Image: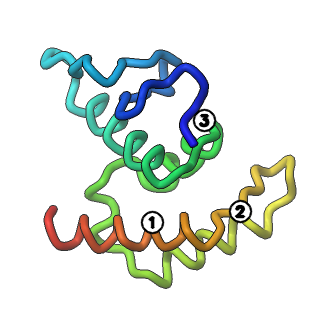
């Protein structure tokens, strides 16, 4: 489920809170770090992490796609369990089976093609 007001395929920039739109490209003059942050954010949107705070929390764990190269499926499971055990005030979130599987699939994709 997409966020309200977000076109399918749109790139969200949570750091500035603006929707870049599906038909807009990320400007070439932006720093590489900004483009990577948008890429991670877009992947998390595709996996269905619809809450901005949840995506920001996950990006703080792994800031770049390349950071997934050294992870294993067990690491994803442990991350999911860690967030589930937190209190609501400490950022508790439930990944659920589908999002956990999608994260693991993304992990394998990154390891195969990065």
Specify the quadrant that holds the N terminus.
top right
Q: Mark 1 and mark 2: span between their CA atoms?
A: 13 Å
Q: Residues within 10 Å of mark 1 (few under 14, many from 20)?
A: some
Q: Going 79% across and 69% down the picture, which residue do you hit?
A: 85
Q: Position of residue 38 (x, y in %)?
A: 35, 34
Verify CB contact (< 8 Å) between mark 1 and mark 2: no
Quarter of the image for residue 25 reads: top left
Question: Is residue 12 shown above or below 72?
Answer: above
Q: Pointer 3 and pointer 2: residues touching (CB < 8 Å)?
A: no
Front-most of 16 and 11? 11
Q: Position of residue 93 (x, y in %)?
A: 72, 57
For image coordinates 38% across by 48% down, the residue present is 43
Question: Which residue is denoted by mark 1 in the rendering?
Answer: 103
In the rendered image, the vertical position of residue 35 relative to residue 64, given as above or below:
above
Answer with mark 3 or mark 2, whichever residue precedes in sequence: 3
User: Which dot marks residue 54?
Assistant: none
Identify whether 111 is placed above or below 13: below
Q: Is residue 61 above or below residue 27?
A: below
Q: Earlier in the sequence, mark 1 or mark 3?
A: 3
* Residue 12 in picture, x, y percent from top left: 43, 28
Disc 2: which residue? 94
Instruction: Identify the coloring.
Output: rainbow
Q: Image point 77% across, 56% down: which residue?
A: 92
Q: Nearer the viewer, residue 65 or 49?
A: 49
Q: In the image, is 3 to the left or to the right of 104?
A: right
* Residue of label 3: 52
SS of the residue under disc 3: helix
Tags 1 and 3 touching, CB below 8 Å: no
Q: CA distance from mark 1 to mark 3?
A: 17 Å
Occupied quadrant, residue 50 = top right
């Amino acid at each position: 489920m997409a966020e309200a007001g977000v076109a399918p395929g749109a790139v969200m920039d949570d750091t500035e809170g603006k929707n870049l739109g599906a038909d807009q490209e990320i400007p070439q003059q932006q720093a590489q770090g900004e483009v990577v942050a948008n890429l991670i954010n877009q992947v998390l949107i595709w996996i269905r992490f619809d809450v901005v705070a949840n995506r920001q929390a996950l990006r703080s764990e792994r800031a770049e796609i390349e950071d997934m190269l050294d992870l294993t499926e067990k690491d994803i499971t442990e991350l999911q369990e860690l967030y589930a055990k937190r209190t609501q005030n400490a950022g508790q979130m439930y990944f659920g089976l589908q999002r956990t599987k999608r994260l693991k699939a993304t992990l394998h994709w990154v390891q195969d093609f990065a």
